Image (tube, rainbow, N blue to C red):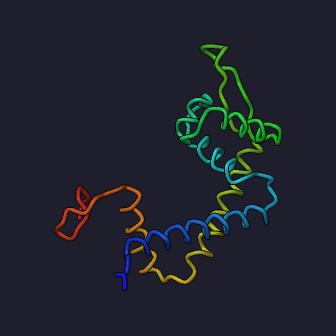
Amino acid sequence: MTAPDPEGLLAEQLLRLTRRVHRIQKRHLERRELGITPAQSRLLRTLAHYGSPPRMADLAQRLEVVPRAVTTLVDGLEANGKVRRVPDPANRRVIRIELTDDGRAALRELRAARRSAAEEILAPLDGQQREALGELLDTLVDGAVSSGCGGPAGRPG
C-alpha cells in the first residue's frame, strides 16, 4: 500500500478551486453581457492600474505574455470601443493604449461581476474562516517559505 500524498492532494485541490473560480467568474461575466473575454477583462484591469496610458510592450510585460497576444486583445477591445490607441506625445511613433469611457464603465461591471463571483465562492465560509483564508492566500501569493520554526519566514507576526 502506498502512503498518502498530502502535497499531491493539496495541489489537486488548488487546481480544482482555480478551475471553479474561473468557471464562476466566466458565468458572472456572461450574465452581464459585456462581450468581454476573461483575457480581455484582465487586460482592462491591468490598464486601469497605470497612471498614464502604457505602451503595448508595457502591458505585455505586466501580463507576462508575448506582445502579439496584447495586440490581439487590444484589437478586440478597440473594436468594441473599450480602449483606443493614442500617439505618445513625446514620440509619435510610439502608440499608447488608454481606456475609453465605455472601457471604464465595463471595468465597473467587471469588478461587480468579480465581487459576485467571490461572494458565491466564499458563501460557505464564515467571517473568521474568510480572514484565515485571506492570510493563507497572502502567504501563498507572497511566496514566503516556512522558516522551519512553524511560521513563514520574512513575514511580520
Quadrant where the C terminus is found in the figure: bottom left
Question: Which quarter of the picture shows residue 77?
Answer: top right
Query: Can you say whether 15 is above or below 68 in the image?
Result: below
Which residue is the extreme one toward the front?
A: 1
Q: Residue furthest left?
A: 149
At a point 66% along the width and 14% down the height, the residue shown is 93
6 up-or-down from 18: above or below: below
Which quadrant is home to the N terminus?
bottom left
Q: Nearer the viewer, residue 23 or 91?
A: 23
Instruction: Report x, y in % for residue 119.
Output: 60, 74
The residue that appears at 59% across and 69% down in the rendered structure is 118
Report which quarter residue 20 is drawn in.
Answer: bottom right
In percent of the image, x 23 and y 67: which residue is there? 151
As drawn, the residue found furthest toward the bottom would be 1
Residue at 81% across / 40% down in the picture? 81
In the rendered image, residue 24, in percent from the top left (x then y), is placed at 67, 69
Q: Is 155 or 127 nearer to us in this picture? A: 155
Most foreground residue, 56 or 128: 56
Q: Position of residue 135 (x, y in %)?
A: 38, 68
Q: How many marks?
A: 0
Residue 25 point in image, percent of width and height: 67, 64
**Where 36 sits versus 100, above or below?**
below
Task: Tell me if 14 is positioned left or right of 136 in this view.
Answer: right
* Quarter-of-image position of residue 102: top right
